[in-house]
Image: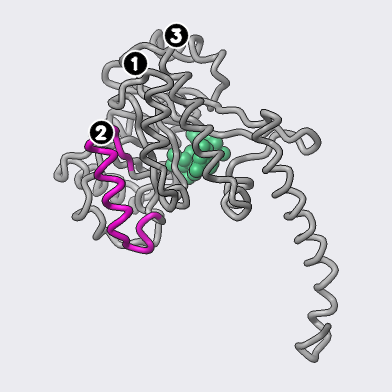
Amino acid sequence: EDRTGNGSFRVFEPAMRAKLKQRREMELDLKAALDSEEFELYYQPFVDIVDKRVSGFEALLRWRHPQKGMISPGDFIPLAEEAGVIERLGIWCLETACTEASTWPQSMTISVNLSPMQFKSPTLLADIDRALAKSGLAASRLQIEVTESLFLDESDRVLDILREMRRRGLTVSMDDFGTGYSSLGYLSRFSFNKLKIDQSFVRDLERAENIAIVRAVIGLSKSLKMQVLAEGIETEGQMRRLLAEGCREMQGYFFSTPQPKEELPRVIADITKR
Ligand code: C2E
Ligand code: CA
Ligand code: CA
Ligand code: CA
């Protein structure tokens, strides 16, 4: 079928069809992956630079595909959303992360990323309650990370759910702060506990623009009484610079890449004796 009349549709069609087919297959694989236990959580530490201690870990999802090997979440999360498995996958992440964190020292928190789609589920809060109850983890040790895209369709429902999370004692963090397309209006409608400065601003701190942005975000977090964490710290120079700007909690390859749970005692020991 060629509706464009110039033939270009016909040229692209086979390639497009192959792509679509590949996507359908991946979606089917995703649906099966939960049952065949192909998902795993890796954990990356949050470091309190002043106290030289691990303050918590972020859970980062990994998919070990039987044929394709390790697939990164940036590639399969959008597919999981389209395939309608993000809700089940999200519940699995919450329960697995809370259970794992319940074995750590009390002073350490666990951060879980939530996709905006999970907020469409009528059972999100109940799912969180169940993950906490099953694991015995205190609500105060669970942090929820959301991105600005959650506010693209400014709904009161989303704000209500976030407020319920805070009422339960959870920490609610704004991830990748400053990279979304939403306005800052949501900051006056909901008080986040924490802002995470995106790694794109940390990457090139020699640029005056990036230093200015980092300084402004730290200032904003202080005046709105939010904690602040800098992501993507890869060098000692970046660490020192951010510390000098007044940011004490950090995360990045400089401290540790995301690691499987077996490695966490070693990660904690390495960071503590630095
Ligand atoms: P994110 O939440 O912003 O996570 C940080 C990403 O940056 C992770 O990639 C992490 O491995 C990477 N990273 C950490 N430190 C450094 C560094 O120093 N340098 C560089 N270049 N990168 C660093 P990852 O694990 O591939 O995750 C990518 C994204 O996938 C996450 O971005 C998050 O948006 C999403 N994601 C991961 N796990 C989950 C999950 O369980 N649920 C949902 N909904 N999304 C998830
Ligand atoms: Ca995150
Ligand atoms: Ca982030
Ligand atoms: Ca990101």
Classify 134 as above or below 245: above
| Residue type of the residue flagged with mark 1 | Arg
Sequence-wise first label, 3 or 2: 2
Classify 123 as above or below 95: below
Asked if the beta carbon under badge 2 is closer than 8 A to the nearest atom of ligand 1, the reply is no
The front one of 123 and 184 is: 123
Q: Residue 168 carries which label?
A: 2
Q: Position of residue 201 (x, y in %)?
A: 39, 47
Which residue carries the number 3 mark?
269
Q: In which quarter of the view is residue 204 placed? A: top left
Sequence-wise first label, 3 or 1: 1
Q: Crowding at label 2, few (<14), some or many (≥20) Cα neighbours within 10 Å?
A: some
Q: Distance between the residues labelled 3 and 2?
A: 32 Å
Region rendered in magenta: 150-173
Asked if the beta carbon under badge 1 is closer than 8 A to the nearest atom of ligand 1, the reply is no
Instruction: State the residue at coordinates (59%, 46%).
Output: 85
Instruction: Say if the magenta span includes residue 156.
Output: yes
Q: In which quarter of the view is residue 155 placed? A: bottom left
| Residue type of the residue flagged with mark 3 | Ala
Which residue carries the number 1 mark?
53
In this figure, which colouring scheme has been used for the structure?
A: one colour
Instruction: Say if the magenta span includes residue 264.
Output: no
| Residue type of the residue flagged with mark 2 | Arg
Image quarter of the C terminus: top left
165 left or right, relative to 75: left
